[in-house]
Image (cartoon, rainbow, N blue to C red):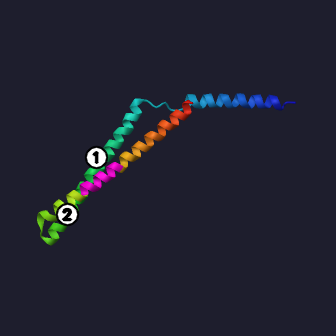
Amino acid sequence: MSEPNDLERLKALDARLASLKKAQAPKTNGVAQGHDMANYAWRMVTELVAGLLIGFGIGFGLDKVFDTMPLFLVLFIFLGLVAGIRTMMRTAQEAQRKSTQAGTAAKNEGD
């Protein structure tokens, strides 16, 4: 006899919990997303510079060992640049994927 009453109470409790969770959920605004994009930008710059510096170091070291000063330096700077750009592109794809997933989740939550 008390079963329908319990079901109604559980549904009411579930509705209250859902509304409280929605109220407590962190609100995303443009500032937070801007900081996230700035972090990605700094990460990309760091990856590019790291690729160039590693290429410079390897090229300079090989030129000192083989006494062919500009040859390996130029070659490995270009290789470091290519490696840095590839890493930047992977980071951009990761940011795009996260942005798409967040947009899909927000769209599904809104429905």
Query: For the point 31% across and 53% down, which residue is it?
Result: 86
- Mark 1 Cα within 10 Å, few/some/many (few <14, many 20+)? some
82, 2: nearer the viewer: 82
Question: On the rendered structure, is 15 left or right of 76?
Answer: right
Find residue 23 and report its image quarter. top right
Residue for badge 1: 45
Whether pointer 1 and pointer 2 mark residues with C-beta atoms closer than 8 Å, the reply is no
Find residue 3 and report its horizontal and vertical position in percent: 83, 32
Residue type, label 2: Gly
Question: On the rendered structure, is 94 left or right of 10?
Answer: left
Magenta range? 80-89
Residue type, label 1: Val
Find residue 30 and report its horizontal and vertical position in percent: 40, 30
In the picture shown, does residue 109 fall above or below 66?
above
Q: Does the segment drawn in magenta span residue 84?
A: yes
Q: Under tag 1, what secondary structure?
A: helix
Instruction: Locate the N terminus by quadrant.
Output: top right
Find residue 97 and report its image quarter. top left
Residue for badge 2: 59
Q: Main secondary structure of the magenta part?
A: helix
